[in-house]
Image: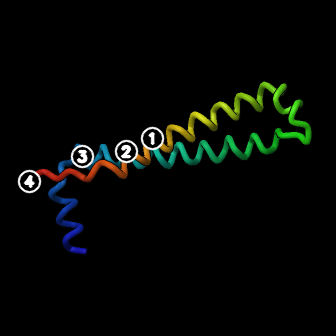
Amino acid sequence: MADERLRVIKTDTDVLMGNLRGEVGVVTAWLLLRHFMAESLKLRSEDPATDLANKELAFLWLLAEKLRNDLIGRLSELCLSPVLTSS
């Protein structure tokens, strides 16, 4: 626990803020994705042809796909980049 605090104290403030912004962006993207997925489920019908003709549903699918790709990209960036500390 003390080592973790020391690591955070030694880390440059700009790096900490950048990491925090990245994590907030991931949470925001996840919440929006869940919302768009839930809304698209409400608009779906039993008929796939009707679903494909529904412009509002198509727009929700498009937004959900964009957010899904953005979320995957952000998570992969976060897992690949180590926390940089100023020495």
Q: Are marks 4 and 3 in contact (CB under 8 Å)?
A: no
Q: Residue at x 68, y 40 (%)?
A: 36
- Farthest residue toward the front? 49
Mark 1 is on which residue type? Answer: Gly
Labels 3 and 2: the sequence-earlier one: 3
Q: Are marks 1 and 2 in contact (CB under 8 Å)?
A: yes
Q: Residue at x 23, y 68 (%)?
A: 4
Q: In whole angstroms, how far apart are the C-alphas of marks 1 and 2?
A: 6 Å
Q: Quadrant of residue 8?
A: bottom left
Q: Are marks 3 and 1 in contact (CB under 8 Å)?
A: no
Labels 1 and 4: the sequence-earlier one: 1
Provide the residue designation for mark 3. Answer: 15
Residue 42 point in image, percent of width and height? 81, 43
Provide the residue designation for mark 2. Answer: 77
Q: Are marks 2 and 4 in contact (CB under 8 Å)?
A: no
Provide the residue designation for mark 1. Answer: 73
- Farthest residue toward the left? 87
Assess disc 4: are there few (<14), some (14-19) or many (≥20) residues with their C-alpha within 10 Å of its C-alpha: few
Q: In whole angstroms, how far apart are the C-alphas of marks 3 and 2?
A: 14 Å
Considering only vertical position in the picture, is 87 above or below 36? below
Provide the residue designation for mark 4. Answer: 87
- Farthest residue toward the bottom? 1
